[in-house]
Image: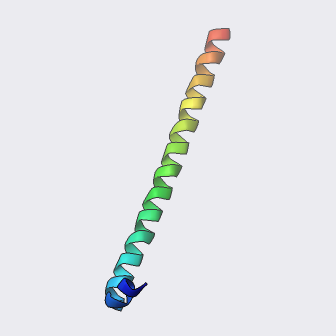
Amino acid sequence: LAVLSVIPLAERFKIGSWFDFRKRVNSVDEETTKTQERITNIGNLNIQIQGEE
């Protein structure tokens, strides 16, 4: 906590917004991964359906 008081308010704000930015990027990455998994699952389903015909 003492270290934070040494850092100027503007710098603290920059650090905070950087962490927020990283969080947003990470959540977008997670969404992208989920979407890719869904696409893969749909592709696998199509292969299974074609295989059963």
- Rendered view: 53 above or below 8: above
Q: Going 46% across and 57% down the picture, which residue do you hit?
A: 26
Q: Going 36% across and 84% down the picture, which residue do you hit?
A: 3
- The chosen color scheme is rainbow
Q: Quadrant of residue 52?
A: top right
Relative to 53, is 24 on the left or the right? left
* Residue at the front extreme of this rendering: 2
Q: Going 41% across and 70% down the picture, which residue do you hit?
A: 19
- Rendered view: 10 above or below 27: below
| Nearer the observer, 4 or 16 | 4
Relative to 4, is 44 on the left or the right? right
What is the quadrant of the N terminus in the image? bottom left
Q: Going 58% across and 37% down the picture, which residue do you hit?
A: 38
| Nearer the observer, 46 or 29 | 29
- Residue 2: % across, % down: 39, 87
- Residue 46: % across, % down: 60, 22
- Rendered view: 18 above or below 9: above
Residue 53 appears anywhere in the view: no
- Residue 16: % across, % down: 41, 77
Residue 47 appears anywhere in the view: yes
Q: Report the number of discs.
A: 0
- Residue 32: % across, % down: 49, 47
- Rendered view: 29 above or below 47: below
What is the quadrant of the C terminus in the image? top right
| Nearer the observer, 44 or 46 | 44
